[in-house]
Image: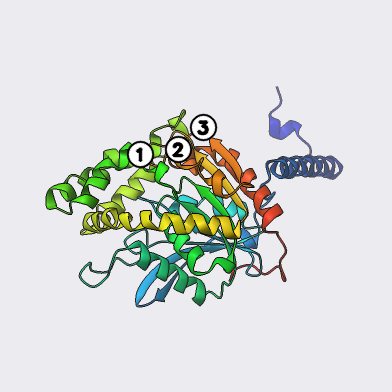
Amino acid sequence: MQSFKASYKFSPLKAGCLFLGAALALGAMSREAKSAESARGAPAIASASSVTHYRTKEVDGVKIFYRETGPKDAPVLLLLHGFPTSSHMFRNLMPALADRYHVIAPDYPGYGQSESPDRAKFNYTFDRYGELVDGLLDQLGVAKYAMYVMDYGAPVGWRLALKHPERISGLIVQNGNAYNEGLKEFWDPIKAYWSDHSDAHRKALYSLVSPETTIFQYTDGVSDTSRVSPDNWIHDQALLDRPGNAEIQMDLFYDYRTNVPLYPAVQAYFRKYQPPTLIVWGKNDKIFPADGAYPYKRDLPEVEFHLIDTGHFVLEDKADEVVPLIRDFLKRKVGTETKRKVAVQ
């Protein structure tokens, strides 16, 4: 038997035909991939505009970290994270929107990569968070924006909306509360701390920053937990376990009480301004259950309402369901026009 080397004779014509055939096949595969991506409502290919940048600005003396992607002159979408995470929760959503939108996702002080000032010198309150995010947007020259609010992001976002109602172009609400109906059994020990600001009630809340609770937040109510990366709770817990961070979280649990008296004003804002609103709510969430989603319909009769079969962190296992809803909503209600197709530098 002849060896392969001895029997094979190089032919430029054959090689050219093989190369052409491979190129045609790859072209067809590329067109199919683009078509499939388009059908899902996501950008077909990565581009310069889909690169995420990681930046820090000093706002009122506090270093605020934020992620940024998309064309500078595109409509702005502000992503406001929840507890116990950070802008990290939006790491997969941002590239899926970057072809059409200028997306900005900050970390609050004490979270993610933002500074964690000494509690003796900094008030860890939702009022302060609202002021700092507002200051960051001013520094970035953002005068109009849609908001994605989730968990703690809701009270931060509501403060922005009440201060600057004319700036809000639309709302995406994902397990973010604005009604008393949304504070169920999970909140009972926190409400007890609101009523009695004692060390005993404070200590009872330390379990909420434990690894078990962090894992619970990512997995409870999720039908297929294999779709949720353990990197999430390992990342979040490492940040929660930083020296002094548990006390920051206790301060914020106590300050959450200040959000409840704001609910009537927030609801009045909904009724008066009727901001275009999309609700994508994890219906199995025990922290912010679906009981808190339905009341939005009272004040926003045109709300686009979707209960998603998952738990607290919808984007972790249901992004394939939620991202097309977000893209379609933003396209219809916020638009996609840019003055210049300039990627974030």
- Amino acid at pointer 1: Lys
What is the x, y in percent for residue 175?
Answer: 46, 45
- Amino acid at pointer 2: Asp
Q: CA distance from mark 3 to mark 2?
A: 14 Å
* Camera-nearest residue between 142 and 70: 142
Residue in the image at 71% along x and 53% along y: 332
Q: Which residue is mark 1?
A: 184
- Labels 1 & 2 near each other (Cβ < 8 A): yes
From the image, state whether disc 1 or disc 3 is nearer to you.
1
Tell me the colour scheme of the image.
Answer: rainbow
- Amino acid at pointer 3: Asp
- Quarter where residue 270 is shown: bottom right
Residue 107 appears left or right of 339:
left
What is the x, y in percent for residue 126?
Answer: 36, 62
Residue 308 shows which numbered tag? none
Crowding at mark 3 (Cα within 10 Å: few <14, some 14-19, many 20+): some
Looking at the rendered image, the quarter that the N terminus falls into is top right
Crowding at mark 1 (Cα within 10 Å: few <14, some 14-19, many 20+): some
Q: Which residue is mark 3?
A: 309
Q: CA distance from mark 1 to mark 2?
A: 8 Å
Crowding at mark 2 (Cα within 10 Å: few <14, some 14-19, many 20+): some
Q: Earlier in the sequence, mark 3 or mark 2?
A: 2
- Quarter where residue 19 is shown: top right
- Labels 3 & 2 near each other (Cβ < 8 A): no
Q: Which residue is mark 2?
A: 291
Residue in the image at 34% along x and 64% along y: 109
